[in-house]
Image (spheres, rainbow, N blue to C red):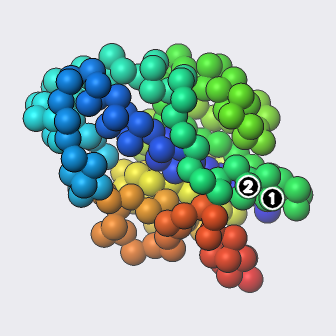
């Protein structure tokens, strides 16, 4: 079968990594509970930044956030390697800006993700993921972002949500911890 995965906040804990980075950069302590209660993908509100300031802060921070030590979610690598060992195909579909394509691919290799260049797609808009997913004829697709997930609801791909505070209103099969995901995937495969 063909399994597709978003990367940021699906396989790696990018927003929380950014949240800690912002605290250092802005010299501002913000309780982690505020992070866990955010109802949108963007994190800047927790620091009292306007949308404009938040966008600038995010863009200034991107290179650091993408290419240093952002943690992979526990259990994610084990699951991907397990799927690969069972002969499934694994695809990565990320809407990171296209200028980060090659560096992101290298970073994924360094972290130990089972990944090949032909199955790695980068630089599309959120709304364009659906076309790639349909063209690839994926059986399963995992993502965290409502703006993406909402485009997939009528499609044949089986969509699974990586649980985040901002996607709890979506009524779809949900993975909270990757270490517990095998059961969900097995039950959906039948
Ligand atoms: Mg994401």
Instruction: Give the answer, above or below, for where 60 lies relative to 184.
Output: above
* Residue 75 picture quarter: bottom right
Q: Does the residue labelled 1 lie within 8 Å of ligand 1?
A: no
Instruction: Give the answer, above or below, for where 111 lies relative to 166.
Output: above
44 sits left or right of 125 in the view: left
Instruction: Give the answer, above or below, for where 163 lies relative to 129.
Output: below
**Residue at the spot x=58%, y=44% of the render?**
72
Count neighbours of disc 2 (C-alpha within 10 A) and say few if under 14, some if 14 to 19, many if 20 or more: few
| Nearer to me, 144 or 127 | 144
At which x and y percent is residue 63?
A: 46, 18
**Residue at the spot x=54%, y=29% of the render?**
69
* Residue 109 picture quarter: top right
Q: Can residue 129 be seen in this view?
A: no
At which x and y percent is residue 157?
A: 61, 64
86 sits left or right of 161 in the view: right
**Residue at the spot x=31%, y=46% of the render?**
41
190 sits left or right of 26 in the view: right
**Residue at the spot x=60%, y=53% of the render?**
74
Q: List the residue tagged with mark 2.
A: 78
Q: Can residue 20 be seen in this view?
A: yes
Do the residues under discs 1 and 2 have CB atoms within 8 angstroms?
yes
| Nearer to me, 185 or 26 | 26
Q: List the residue tagged with mark 1.
A: 82
């Amino acid at each position: 079968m063909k399994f597709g995965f978003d990367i940021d906040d699906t396989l790696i804990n990018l927003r929380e990594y950014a949240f800690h980075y912002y605290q250092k950069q802005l010299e501002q302590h913000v309780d982690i509970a505020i992070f866990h209660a955010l109802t949108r993908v963007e994190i800047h509100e927790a620091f009292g930044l306007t949308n404009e300031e938040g966008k600038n802060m995010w863009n200034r921070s991107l290179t650091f956030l993408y290419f240093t030590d952002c943690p992979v979610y526990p259990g994610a690598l084990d699951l991907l390697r397990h799927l690969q060992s069972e002969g499934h195909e694994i695809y990565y579909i990320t809407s990171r800006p296209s200028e980060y394509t090659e560096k992101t691919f290298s970073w994924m290799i360094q972290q130990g993700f089972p990944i090949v260049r032909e199955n790695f797609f980068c630089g599309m808009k959120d709304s364009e993921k659906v076309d790639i997913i349909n063209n690839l004829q994926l059986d399963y697709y995992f993502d965290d972002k409502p703006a993406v997930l909402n485009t997939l609801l009528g499609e044949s791909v089986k969509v699974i949500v990586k649980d985040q505070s901002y996607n709890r209103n979506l009524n779809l099969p949900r993975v909270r911890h990757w270490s517990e995901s095998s059961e969900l995937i097995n039950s959906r495969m039948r």
